[in-house]
Amino acid sequence: MWLIEHWQKLDSDATPEGVLDQLLNLVTVLPVLPVIVAAILISGIPWMFVVSRILSWADIQYYTKQKGRRIPFLSDWLDRLWLRMIESRRPKSPTSGSSE
């Protein structure tokens, strides 16, 4: 709300009087929505990194399998990022080093 009030100079306490005022408010707020979504995604990446270092491998496997609704592009990108973060934590299998 602070961003909308100060950056876009809108009074959040005032009620729009007509249809044009409501339309103006909608058009002014719409460009802020992608910025908010990007900020949420960017702020989530450090938490993913911290969690990938703190949790045990069993917990990481449990939470990786718990998936909710998926947005195809973002989910795939975030899944790849998460798998890169936990790759160093994955236990090495005894047969992975031998060449037969």
Image (spheres, rainbow, N blue to C red):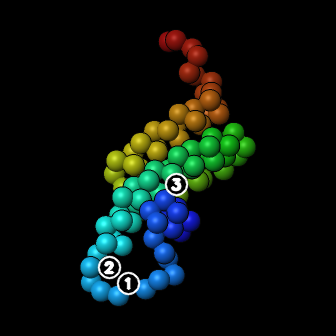
| SS type, badge 3 | helix
Q: Is residue 11 above or below residue 49?
A: below
Q: Residues within 10 Å of mark 1 (few under 14, many from 20)?
A: some
In three-dimensional space, the C-alpha distance between marks 3 and 2, rounded to whole angstroms, equals 29 Å
Q: Nearer the viewer, mark 3 or mark 2?
A: 2
Q: Is residue 56 above or below residue 9?
A: above
| SS type, badge 1 | loop
In three-dimensional space, the C-alpha distance between marks 1 and 3, rounded to whole angstroms, equals 29 Å
Question: Do the CB atoms of the residues marked 1 and 3 lie less than 8 Å apart?
Answer: no
Instruction: List x then y, in percent, for residue 87.
Output: 57, 32
Residue at which label 1 appears? 16
Q: Is residue 3 above or below residue 57?
A: below
Q: Nearer the viewer, mark 1 or mark 3?
A: 1
Name the foreground residue: 74 vs 36. 36
Question: In the image, what residue occupies the spot 32% across and 79% down?
Answer: 21
Question: Do the CB atoms of the residues marked 2 and 1 lie less than 8 Å apart?
Answer: yes
In three-dimensional space, the C-alpha distance between marks 2 and 1, rounded to whole angstroms, equals 5 Å
Q: Is residue 58 left or right of residue 71?
A: right
Residue at which label 2 appears? 21
Question: In the image, what residue occupies the spot 46% across and 44% down?
Answer: 79
Instruction: List x then y, in percent, for residue 86.
Output: 59, 37
* Residue 35 visible in the picture: yes
Precedes in sequence: disc 3 or disc 2: 2
* Residue 56 visible in the picture: no
Residue at which label 3 appears? 40
In this view, the residue farthest toward the top is 99
Instruction: List x then y, in percent, for residue 14.
Output: 47, 83
Name the foreground residue: 30 vs 53. 30
**Callout 1, which amino acid?**
Pro
